[in-house]
Amino acid sequence: MSAVVARWKRFWFEPVPTSTLGVVRAVFGLVVLAWTLSLAPDLFTFFSRRGIIAAHLNIPLEIGLLRWFPGNGMVVGLFVALVLASVCLVVGYRTRLASLVVFLGVLSFEHRNPFVFNSGDGLVRLIAFYLMLAPAGASLSLDRWRRARDRFWEFPARAPWALRLIQVQLSIVYAATVWAKVRGTDWNDGTAVSYALGIADIDRIHLPLHLVMSPALMNLATYGALAIEASLAVLLWNRRARPWVVGLGILLHLGIDVTIMVGFFSFALFTAYLAFVPEDTMAAWLLARRRALQESKVSLLRRWASAGPVDHAPAEPEPEPASAPALS
């Protein structure tokens, strides 16, 4: 029993380098920036009091800033704040505050009009919540540059529990998806992909009818998708199998994204995939990029890459800055 407890504590709380967390933060900031900008063309149509939904829906737990302040000024202000906060998240500036603003902004827009979002948008909101709890500015950030410029390319160790939540969430997403699909009929009889590709309102590429109606091809696509998703739910936790199932997952979701308009679902999943990159692997990759930048012809990049003499992640955790809340 003591061994189980020790493994549990090590999994959630033993400090690890924040190299992977820093990359997840930066990539997620780019995803949220693109997500926010995609709202611009229909901002007032979807979210203002003169839009398709005049008032906030009276749904339990559907909270947000646009429920309490529904005016057009708040819609514009929240949009601008979300753009700025996502940029701050990319570069890691005032990361705690930026991640809080990102979460509140995404939550407020999604709860104001849930009919224009899908499960991928919900995953964006969940990742924003987990990053809000994480020491996401500990590495590869302007916060790190301001605190310890001479050690910028070190990756101080922190407890990984918030990053672990992203990993667990991704596994749950695939397990729940498979469970929901096998309880119906279309996925069991091998026709689900054919139906999905036949919905003209959301297709990105109109495939030839003989492909969409081919029983053999659609059976292969349907059962293949189920097999890949079931594998991802479990084998993401196996370090040897992980690269193979992640590769299959990327191919699956790229195929979905090319043929069907699914919004930011694939990009949110790809961001969560990054959470499974081992910290030592990510640190080695980042330091290799650093060496390449040191040979850049752009002086600013060379200066950035040359910050600090250390060329490896520290073995011991650094103390949290006194001004930062010790959430992990």
Image (cartoon, rainbow, N blue to C red):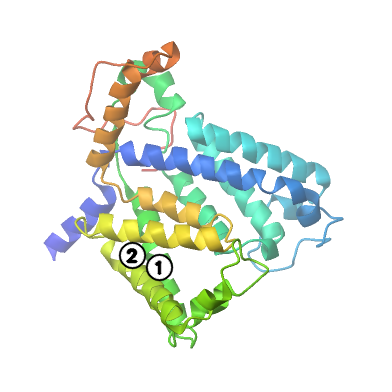
Judged left or right of residue 117, residue 147 is left
Residue found at x 39% / y 38%: 23
**Disc number for residue 202:** none
Label 1 neighbourhood size at 10 Å, few (<14), some (14-19), many (20+)?
some
Q: Quadrant of residue 208?
A: bottom right
Q: Nearer the viewer, residue 196 or 275?
A: 196
Residue 322 image offset from top left, x and y in percent: 39, 27
Residue 274 image offset from top left, x and y in percent: 36, 48
Question: Which residue, given by chain and number where applicable, does mark 2 sit on?
Answer: 232
Residue found at x 44% / y 88%: 189
Q: Nearer the viewer, residue 20 or 161?
A: 20
SS class, disc 2: helix
Question: Which residue, given by chain and number where applicable, does mark 1 sit on?
Answer: 174
Residue found at x 34% / y 67%: 233
Visible residue check, residue 155: no
Q: Nearer the viewer, residue 111 or 303?
A: 303
Judged left or right of residue 151, residue 53 is right
